[in-house]
Image: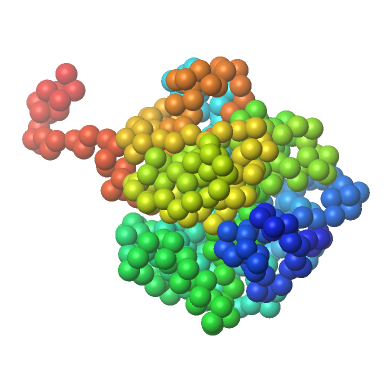
Amino acid sequence: MPLPESLTCVLCSAVYREGPSQYSCPQCGELGTLRVSYDYDRIRASAGRDGMANLPFRDHWRYLPLLPLAAGRVEFPLAVGGTPLYPVPGLRKALGLERLWIKDDTANPSASLKDRASSLVLLKGRELGRREFAAASTGNAGASLACLSAALELPCHIFVPETAPRAKVAQLLIFGADVLSVRGTYSEAFSLCVEASDRFGWYNRNTGYNPYTVEGKKTVALEIAEQLGWEPPDTVIVATGDGCILSGVWKGFTDLYRVGWISRLPRLVAAQAEGSQSIKQAFDGDGTIRAVVEDTLADSISVALPRNGVMAVQDLKASGGCAVSVSDGEILEAMALLGKTAGLFAEPAAASAVAALVKLADQGEVPSGERVVVLSTGHGLKDVDAALQAVDPPEPLECSIDAVARRVS
């Protein structure tokens, strides 16, 4: 199996070997995210995409030859990955786009894409000798780790800001996690989780901090490529907070390219909320990640200081892509649009990617024949309060057929 050949800092290019306490670059701190690389020539010689045809499209362990695990086979109690890629004809018609797909990762066990990262981090942590796990989260990453830890009978500790949506906190509690509700922001909860993990020897799953979160999230790109017959889309639109999913998508496509399974690469679009757009500002500016004041209802992408921001900006530029910011109002409109045209219920963060597509389409930035994939990263039931802002709740009516007739006439 392709154990990492190296872990390289995105800031100073220092190279490290993997280990149970090797997260970000010690010289550069938390923004010194580490890139995982492999012996791609060996992978190319030992594995081929044709072998995928003999495996059921059930989960993302079908891509084990491209994942950083020593095991030659994985037995996992829940099916992670293998999510549908929908052609969404109603949304295509509404936006005037002929070749548009939604990759629906709400079909994962905890109803978010984060399960891809959590499942890999749990197995990698066990491989490195750890038996207790931790994460800071606004909800989805924590719910994911709690869900999959429960399935593997492993203890976990989840640090959340006290403003985390109740539905997501409910998931954590139902899955039996030790929930630490922090009086502070997500960034403060993140730092406290890092400190606690160091002190108590927990394996830290934090997004943009543990290098294997990107490796898990890259499997969504591997699936998209396979589902489109190994012909990558022209554009992939990704809701972006810490930037880890975006980097995962780019890593997935570039890994496929380096082993010869695809012949070209897509461009990426980072969708950011106007109230949390540090990565967009860095991309449009000098590339430096600077903290912003978080102010958006899209809690899953509400991040003051993106730990994976440097890598995300580098990847966005390498793809020839762009960053788009959308308002909370545009996000709510996109939630309703996706629901009524495609039958898909996305939380605000996931809907931000649809909102970005709407904005690009309106500006003529997406040709009608371009092949576009939008990621739906989290289910709308995770934030019902926000969803109710996107629609007009019905007024109660009398329980009579005449009242119904007046209502529908």
> Does residue 271 sit above or below 292 in this rendering?
above
- Residue at the outermost front position: 286
Residue that protrudes farthest toward the bottom in the picture: 200
State the image coordinates of residue 181 (x, y, percent, origin top left). 36, 70
Residue plotted at (63% across, 54% down): 214
Tell me which residue sits at (71%, 41%) in the image. 253
State left or right for residue 190 relative to residue 267.
left
In the depicted structure, whether residue 21 falls above or below residue 256: below
The structure residue drawn at horizontal position 83% and vertical position 44%, both measured from the top left corner, is: 259
Residue 93 x, y percent position in the rendering: 47, 19
Tally the marks. Answer: 0
Q: Is residue 14 visible?
A: yes
Q: Classify residue 283 by image quadrant.
A: top right
Left or right of 32 on screen, residue 328: left
Question: What colouring does the structure picture have?
Answer: rainbow
Q: Quadrant of the N terminus?
A: bottom right
Q: Is residue 349 visible?
A: no
Closer to the camera, 345 or 187? 187
**Residue 279 higher or lower than 366, as above or below:** below
Question: Residue 206's image quarter?
Answer: bottom right
Identify the residue shown where x is 73% and y is 57%. 13
Residue nearest the viewer, comparing 241 with 113: 241
Indicate the quadrant containing the C terminus: top left, top right, bottom left or bottom right: top left
Q: Position of residue 260 (x, y in %)?
A: 83, 39
Residue 46: x and y, percent? 89, 51
* 346 or 20, nearer to the observer: 20
